[in-house]
Image: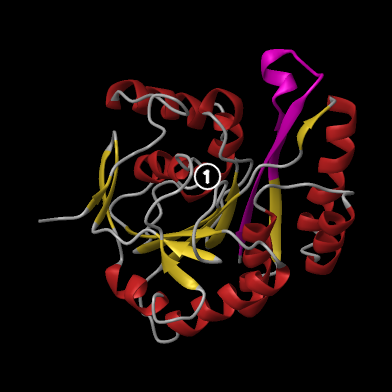
Amino acid sequence: MDRIKKPMVAGQFYPANADALTKNIENYLENAKPNKDYGNVFGIISPHAGYPFSGRTAACAFNCIRDKKYDTVFVIAPSHSFISSPIGIYDYDYYKTPLGLIPIEQNIIDLLFEVEDIGDIKFGIRPENSLETQLPFLQTVLDEFQLVPILIRDQSLRTAEKLATIIQNILSGYDKKVLFVFSTDLSHFHSAQTAEKLDRRLIKSIEEMNLQKLDKLIQSGDGEACGFGCVETGLVLAEKYGINKIDILDYTHSGKIIDDNSRVVGYVSAVLYE
């Protein structure tokens, strides 16, 4: 019998009805088209809040890969609740969303489990949205693909460098087309004025692909991102694969959506490409 990871935040972060979800995503995509064509996309950075808040920002990134061919997609997302290992993997045959089943790339999963500090995610304290919210977008913009779902609990730079090295080693000789999705939101629960200052600093470090500057901003509190370890993993991977181009596609915060600037959350999307 197939082992299926059921959706946990459908009906909360995005519509649980397939038709409504498709219409929702297509509307975001229609209103978030890129200014240029990205030929060879290595990876994207995408937010993971409820779609009413960050859907359009996410769509800016997913439009960059629309109708492209990828065999395998790594989604690297932060764990918002406790998991037992520094890096966790959902070990199932399929991940289910309202739009259907996504097959898991079991060969890569098996290789990841051979590495110390990578473990099976048996449960979490709460349903995890950071990874799941990426999946309906992927199902909409891509044809068939296999998924490698990774959650990071320990978002240190050391872990980011380790995970990037592990992935590079596993993909050595891998002859399939791979895409990376790095999931993060930015600052949380500051005034809009403060949030924009924090977010702009961090976004600038991402745009410069300056790993050390990004990490320094996080450690000093001069920048915030709940998935900074995922972004750092992305920048390390980009360096390893010789990817030196990144475009920031969109930035917004929740205050611009619900007209409450007292306590906002920031969202950014970007594309890494050749």
Magenta extent: 249-273
Figure check: 91 above or below 51 = below
Nearer to the camera, 265 or 21:
265
Q: Quadrant of the C terminus?
A: bottom right
Specify whether 90 is left or right of 52. Answer: left
- Residue depicted at 48% across the width and 44% down the height: 125
Give the main secondary structure of the magenta stretch: strand
Nearer to the camera, 158 or 36:
158
- Residue depicted at 78% across the width and 55% down the height: 207
> Where's residue 237, x and y in %?
61, 72
- Mark 1, Cα crowd under 10 Å, few <14 / some 14-19 / many 20+, is many
Q: Is residue 258 magenta?
A: yes
> Where's residue 107, x and y in %?
29, 75
Specify whether 141 is left or right of 47. Answer: left
> Where's residue 272, x and y in %?
62, 59
To which quarter of the image does residue 200 belong?
top right
Q: State whether residue 149 appears in this view.
A: yes
Q: Is residue 42 magenta?
A: no
Query: Farthest left residue?
Result: 1
Nearer to the camera, 7 or 238:
7
Specify whether 30 is left or right of 218. Answer: left
Q: Quadrant of the N terminus?
A: bottom left
Colouring method of the image: secondary structure
Nearer to the camera, 270 or 11:
11
Q: Amino acid at mark 1?
A: Ser
Q: State whether residue 242 appears in this view.
A: no
- Residue depicted at 62% across the width and 59% down the height: 230
Q: What residue does disc 1 label?
A: 130
Figure check: 190 above or below 80 = above
Query: Farthest top residue?
Result: 259
> Where's residue 100, x and y in %?
24, 40
